[in-house]
Amino acid sequence: MADLVAVGADPGRDRRDPEPTPVAGSVTAVLVVCDGMEWLPAALAALSSQERAPDRIVAVDVGSVDGSGLLCVRALGAARLVGLARGTSFAAAVASGLAAVGGPPPDGFVWLLHDDAAPRPDALRHLLLYAATDPSAAVLGPKIHDWSAPGIVREVGVALDRTARRVTGLAPDEHDHGQHDGPRDVPAVSTAGLLVRSGAWTRLGGLSVDLAAAEDVDFGWRAGRSGLRVVVVPMAVVTHRRAGATGRRGIRTPRVARRTHRQAALFVRLANAPAGWLPLIAVHLALVGLGRTAVRLARLRPADAADELLATAAVFASVRLLARGRRTRRAGSRAGRPVPHRVVRRTHALIPAQRAPLGRDPAARDPAARDLPSREAAGREAAGGPAVEVRPVEVRRPDRTWMALGGVLAVVGLATARAGGGFGSTGVAARLLPAPGGATAVWSALASGWSGGASAGLGGPGPAPGWTPALAVLSTLCGGKPWLALDLVLAGGPVLAGLAAWWAAGSIRPAVRRPVRLAGAGAYGLVPVVTGTVAAGRFDVVLAMVVLPLTLAAAVRASGAVPRRVRAAAVARVALGAAAVAACSPPLAIPLALVLLGGAALTRRPARLVHRLAWVFAVFGAAAAMLWTFAADAGRQPGLLVRGYGTLAAAPVTGPLVAAGSRPVALAAAAGAGVVGLAALVGLTRPRVAPAAWAGWAVALIAAGAAAGSARGIAGVRGSIAPDLALAALGLLGAAMVATRGARLDLGNHAFSWRQPAAAALAAVTLGAPVVLAVVAVVAPGSPASASSGAGSAPWGALAGPDGGRVLVLTGSAPVRYSLVGSLGPRLGDLDARVPAAARAFTSATVTALVTGAGDPAATARLVPLGVGAVAVPASGAGGAVVAALDATPGLVRAQVGTGFLVWRPAAGGPGADGGAGGGARLSVVDGATARPVGADGQVPAGGNGRALVLAEPVDRAWRATLDGRRLPARPGSGFGPAFALPAAGGRVLVRYDDGPRRIVLGAQAVAVLLAVGVASNGAQRIRRRTG
Amino acid sequence: MRRALRLGSAVIGVVALGGAGALAATRAPAPVGGAGPAPAVPVAMTSVVCPNLLAGYTGSRAGSGRAVRVALATAGPAPAGSVTRAPVGRTGVDTVTASGPGAGGITTTVTATGTGTARAASRALCVAPAATTWFAGPGTGAGADPLLTLTNPGPGPARADIAVVTGAGAAGDNETGAAGDSATGADLGGDSATGDPMGMVDPGVGVPAGSTVTVRLAALAPEATATAVRVTVREGRLATSLLDRDSVPGPGRNVAAVPPSAAPSRTVLIPGEAAGPGRRVLVIAAPTGDAMVRVEQVGAGSRYSPVGLAAVAVAAGTVTRLDLGRAPAADGSVLATVTAGAPVLAALGLTSSNTTSANGTAPARTWLAPVPPPAGAQPSSTTVVAVPGLPAGNAGEVVIATGSGGGRARLDTGAAVALPAGRTVTIGLPPRYRGGTLTITGAGTGGAAGGAVAQILRRAGATGAGPGAALVLPPAVDAVRGVTVLDDPRAAAQR
């Protein structure tokens, strides 16, 4: 055991090193081997090439079956090999190895090595050097590099977080630019390359033999409790395969390896927890285990979920083992004065690199940790060694430009929404119709299978509009306030659209420069169809416009995804996006499908046709499964695919550019489209980017075709072109962005001519377009808020009467627009109520009879089955002819209600009405010619035979009525609503809509969505990594 | 070559895109589907209320000789369905309800005979309850006591606001003359801060179910040379009538029904300016704003503006009474056209005497005003007017004033005349004419601006007798224009 001199310290190679210093102390290296033929040769070679070789090397073979032991014998000699039974833990193997050589060398060091870890030649030298300069450092560890990608740093110290997760504080796949190269105190270091002073080893009793994994964290923790410092010395580098943790070693499958590690980590967390906090920590970890299980289940990884559950259960089941572990640790720490837990915790807080700003001294920022470095420095000074210099390193800063983009777009969004009518329940969110009262109403509208149910107006069997699930989820997240959800989506529309475009632009290949990406994303968020749609209060279309770029990006990524799991997740993402877009804006369904199909056909990715076909089938199948009821609805009325939601089947649609706002805005949009189109055109002429530019153009052309179709009318149905224009804008912007790729270089190759000024002008105008759009959107906002409704303030309840009647509201003259309003007033979704044709015809005929002024005495009588208690004409928009006609209608009397409405009520005692005060009723008992309303309590008095219970809703077979729980038989109705035979006895009646099959389909659809979300959430990390 | 191809296709793409955009942008939104012209709907039922012409009379009603007559006229051959007549309580007011085919073709009149010596019958049209009723004409000066009657034929209570445009201050200004005098609006205690030039509103005259409430116009607006009245129903259904009558009670009392007028309009054509003794007054009210009105005399062969009447200024919220002088030698019409300003109401009064009373408020014998256009009337080249029969002892004629277009008129008796544009044509009714139809073909006869028909009654056998009663007849409406209705939940969200 002669003193050795560190060799190979060439000052020219590493300027940080001090002059070669004699490094004192004997080093015993313990190499634990198990089935390591794949990597052991490299490990042995690295060991033998150490500049400062260990004094003694002992290899411990844990029952290798692949000849690893033989290799060790050849390399080190038979005497240096200890053979142990397969399955022996790492800690036990180390202990046995050391025992075989007579224990740790006195005043020396123990160096632990794995068979899948290859220390760099200078690793041990650096460790020893640091140990010499810092005598108080008891446990030293190297920086761990990835085995297969040596530039990637994997660990610079390690810790367990509160959920017993192993954390390194490093970003995934972080490149080592030396940004972590300051030696510092850490909670623990990996056992691969761990150098520990013999005294510390003896004092701690070595690694804990109870543990099958995580012994390194445990060791560091115990060291900390014993007042021993654990220091990472990043100058020493070990490349580590991490075969055990990832299950690449033959003894455990990856799953078992993961479970073992999780179990060990939990054990370590519990065994080292302070006694006072133990119950709380135990409960916390149990909840964490359940939560992680649920998350894995949701992500469709049942095996992982089972592992998590098993690991948690196993730890809590081994109470005795845990108790013993805690006892031994207590006993170990009792030897000296244990360091308080809070101090150890502070050390733990030091490890994550995100808390230690890049290239800076962590202690400078973390006041809680100030005492530790001082302790460290004191130790260094005591040793007389030089202070270890921390070298500031320039690293690439994470991209935060999107935040600025978001800020600008947020201002625009707020301005646009404010111009559109402001906020709150009567603001821009109510531009179309006021939002339903609460999230419950939205959920029940979604689940009931009776469309138009949110308002108590006229409804019918059919699904709620496709955007209802989104609104339901959002309003639940907003604390049950749908108007708040609408406000957030609308005011945040430009932000969300811009950020979505920003994210999506990251998937453009060839990649584009950041300013270009920023300008493109900003332009999309500010394009007048987006701001105009916000001002128009169309939250559903805004949602579609937000999801659209994400869907296209997902499609681009899915076509390039190779691993099977990622491919499934990518396909699920595309399907989810497409389903969301189609559900929120059905007119986008066909163009988007064409884009996806075209993309699959033309990009030739995946390469094999059968894969491509499978891709297409998977995407469309999944989307169809998620959209089943909505698709069926669209199948029954194909006009929906052109018209979209929120419009009337037989109504004039909003003008094509109405959505684009006022004339200056439309002109600005046209000019902007021209400029962007020109830039996109340039892309077609540049061979390197032409394919991508063509793809963008194809999207734009498909969308433009759809827009032209919508504007002209397809099969007599016309629709708003705003969604199509958004898609076209995306295509054009994509093509324009891609056109800039390498443009500077190309221009540099040309002599100065018209090209450079033209390109500069084009670039200036294109980059300036978002700015202009932003100014235009704020200064000259879309259409004025004249159509903003104050419907929330109308006393619909008072007009409708106490028995849940309706109000017939009439406006205009040619045509006369009518609406049957329930006591809640008109609500979002009423426009898409699927009123059966017969019911609609009945209503139309009734209204026609009322407003033509033909004096049809039956007109008033027909109001009774509709439950109409009042006919109202807005005083400001009253058509004289309509008012005169209503005045001339027999049985209809003007009522004096000072609400801004002229109101007529069916005369009390008039035809067919027996209801007091002329109020309508949703449910009434008809006995011969008299009808008596059923109150909110549902109580029906006893009466004669032959009575009928009549409901003022369109007939459907799924209506069920019960009297005190007994089902009432249906009987022929009045021509409008369903009727049930009522026995002579009285009681409490209950009528409900119960469409079982539809509910099952809805449930299946929900399951499909959850499945897709689960599959899509897999591999998100990987995607982030690739795009990050 | 490849590059050119690429560039070319790109240009084509841009042009296609621009074309699509332009196409989309230029196509104005238009109603699609279901918004076509709606078919006409036959009138199923009409219900009118006939005023009590003897309201306020002393003496027994039994001897009043009051009769309600229903004249039927249909454009087609279908006969009327059932016609029922029911009194409204003990008010002397009757409700006439016609239902079934042809219900829209009836013209119902109420006639009072024998109320004065040597007088022709007085006759009024029965009118349907309406939300807003306009009247123009009678003054409330000495000797005149117009009576407004609100009848509630419905089963529930009703309530109405009454607004009067009048001039209390002008009442003392009894100068008469062609230039007329002005009356200004007076506040009757209503809310004048509403910005309504009608100024005064008597809010809330309640009328119980099945009864009438009479309001003396003189009580609302005393000493006015002329008035215009607007009755707005706030609640329930009300039929309103206005009687212009002498203030002196007695059997010889003059009573003339003031017909409800069409709403203020820019062109008011009043036919029925009967020839004979007596004078004529024209009352013009501008309830909504200042107006400059040209008054024209439309005769059988001429049309001119009398001296001083080519530009009559009517201030907002005032009534102007113009003395048109002696009646013309042949039946004529009066046309009032607003040349500038707000629409006006106009009524033509025919007085029985050639002299003007001292205060200019001598009751007119009869009042004529354009009838409110029937709701839902369809534009048609043929207009059918139901002509009521002649009361016993009366003769009469039909006066047709044509608008901008000519045509032809044919009475069901076979009498037919050509109708030149912008003239007045008279067709005499045969003695004991029992009522029938007048069919007018050709453009320019429908509506107030286009043309109008009036009937004049005269005492039979009395040579040179003045007109007894004259009334403008409404066109029969067999079927109303269909209305396209559209289920639109947004209707309730618009205020």
Image (cartoon, coloured by chain):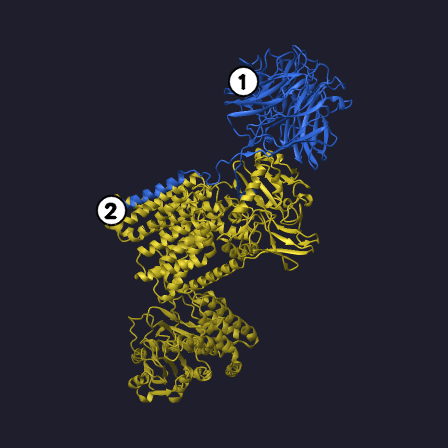
Chain colours: A yellow, B blue
Q: Are marks 1 and 2 in contact (CB under 8 Å)?
A: no
Up-down relation of residue B253 to residue A1026 (above or below):
above
Q: Which residue is mark 2?
A: B5
Residue A162 image position (x, y, % from top left):
50, 71
Residue B416: image tag: 1
> Within 10 angstroms of label 1, few (less than 14), some, or many (20 or more) residues?
some
Q: Residue furthest left?
A: B1
Up-down relation of residue A755 to residue B449 (above or below):
below
Up-down relation of residue A598 to residue A670 (above or below):
below
Mark 1, secondary structure of its residue: strand
Work out whether residue A972 or residue A826 is closer to the camera in this orientation and state it: A972
> In which quadrant of the rendered view does residue A283 lie?
bottom right
Residue A262: image tag: none
Residue A351 image position (x, y, % from top left):
44, 70
Mark 2, secondary structure of its residue: helix
> In which quadrant of the rendered view does residue B61 lie?
top right
Chain where mark 1 sits: B
Residue B385 image position (x, y, % from top left):
58, 24
